[in-house]
Amino acid sequence: MTVIINYLLSFFWNTRSMDLMFGVIAFLLLFAISSWFPLPVLNKLILLLANVAAIAIIVIFQPELRAALSKLSLKTTRSREITEFDKFLDQLAASTYRMAEKQIGALIVLEKDDSLDEYAKKAVILNADFTSELIETIFCRTAPLHDGAIIIKDKKIIAASVILPLADSPHIQKSLGTRHRAGIGLSLVTDSLVIIVSEEQGKVSLARDGIITRGIKIDRFKGVLRSLFYQEQEPVGIKKENIWEWLKR
């Protein structure tokens, strides 16, 4: 009971619902007083009001109760990580292919192990939470930051208007533009994954390890990003064993 009361008070403290909580506590104290002293009429009235008050409290505290129950979710940390990553991936994919449909050029860098601080320091630092609205606003043709790339790290947009090194190799197709050459150039010197949205053709390409794959469909796009980035959230050095091998230790 102490744990439950502490949880409820900590949840409602410093909110507008706290005044109602004080009213409920005062109602309970009045009920206790009517039980301790010979006040049968008051006790009967409080019991009758309690039946209506129970329903009224549920209606009044509906938003707060929904939020409190959601915090008591039995989902594990692993499940929450999957949900958060899938939400990020869905937003990124939707934004990327929306820009491709509108033929808005974009250059998106997803940082992995190799640090990209040297490129971010020369650009406009944002350190903003990733949202699909923000990324599409940055690459809007009339926006001041649309020229260049953005760097995303841990679901945060670190910097915008980033200048990437251009790939200069005779093996690269001459038909590739500056945006594609910049994506290949960065993928040659880092382990980052670069997403390129073509302004001329409206196609999505991925560059990694100096190799560019053009015309990626959205299902494959999600599969590649999930395989490359979600595995990094798994604990390192933990081997999967069956229950029998564990019991034999």
Image: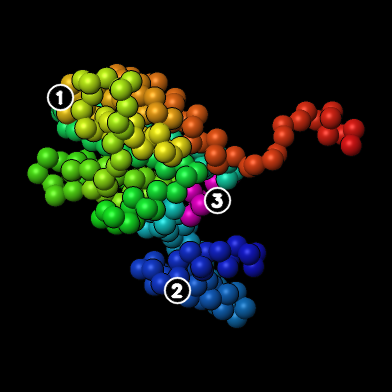
* Residues at discs 1 and 3 in contact (Cβ within 8 Å): no
Mark 3 burial class by Cα count in 10 Å: few <14, some 14-19, many 20+: few
Magenta stretch bounds: 68-74
Residue 195 visible in the snapshot: no
User: What element does badge 1 sit on?
Assistant: loop
At x 39%, y 53%, the residue is 117
Task: Say whether disc 3 or disc 2 marks the residue closer to the N-terminus.
Answer: 2
| Residue receiving disc 1 | 200
Along the viewing direction, whichever of 140 and 69 lies nearer the viewer: 140
Say what amino acid the circle numbered 1 marks: Glu
Against 146, is 198 above or below?
above
In magenta stretch: residue 105:
no
Residue 155 locus on image (x, y percent): 40, 46
Spatial separation of the CA atoms under disc 3 and disc 2:
24 Å
Q: Looking at the image, is mark 1 or mark 3 earlier in the sequence?
A: 3
The quarter of the rendered structure image containing the N terminus is bottom right
